[in-house]
Amino acid sequence: MALLHVDVSVNIATASCGRYHFAAFTIFLDALNEKISSAFRATVISVANLGTRASFALLGPVFGYGIDAFGLPSVLSALGILFSIVFVFLLLPLVVRERSLSLAKGVKQ
């Protein structure tokens, strides 16, 4: 029964992180597309993807050690708190800026 609980927890966490990653990366790419000229856009997106994959490769063993030392529920809770903080402080300002730009365009037309 405990194994089933862990499998369900891991599946839910994976699905949640996948949706979070997709939404966050979409907002990030939209911001990049506004700032970067088309001549360098592919390179910048490739480097951003490389950074994402490198962070997974570097942090995977750290999280594995944390799971061994503290248990899966504790590590997943810590990751949830960490990702929430990162979302609020890094991505939410982009969303607010995008909405204000959209409202400004609507007023000008």
Image (tube, rainbow, N blue to C red):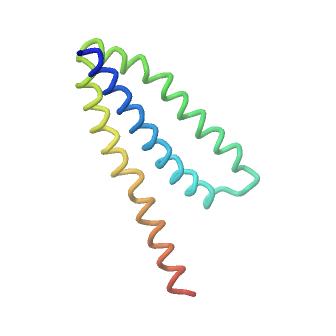
Image position of 100 with respect to 22: above or below = below
Left or right: residue 93 compared with residue 81 = right
- At which x and y percent is residue 6? 29, 20
Image position of 65 with respect to 29: above or below = above
Rendered image quadrant of residue 94: bottom left
- At which x and y percent is residue 87? 37, 48
Identify the residue shown where x is 59% and y is 54%. Answer: 32
Residue placed most toward the observer, 37 or 95: 95
Q: Residue furthest front?
A: 1
- At which x and y percent is residue 15? 42, 36
Residue placed most toward the observer, 34 or 17: 17
- At which x and y percent is residue 30? 57, 56
Identify the residue shown where x is 33% and y is 51%. Answer: 88
Image position of 99 with respect to 42: above or below = below
Identify the residue shown where x is 52% and y is 82%. Answer: 106
Identify the residue shown where x is 59% and y is 37%. Answer: 49
Quadrant into which the C terminus falls: bottom right
Residue placed most toward the observer, 40 or 72: 72
Q: Residue furthest top?
A: 68
The mark tally for this picture is 0
Image position of 81 with respect to 35: above or below = above
Quadrant into which the N terminus falls: top left
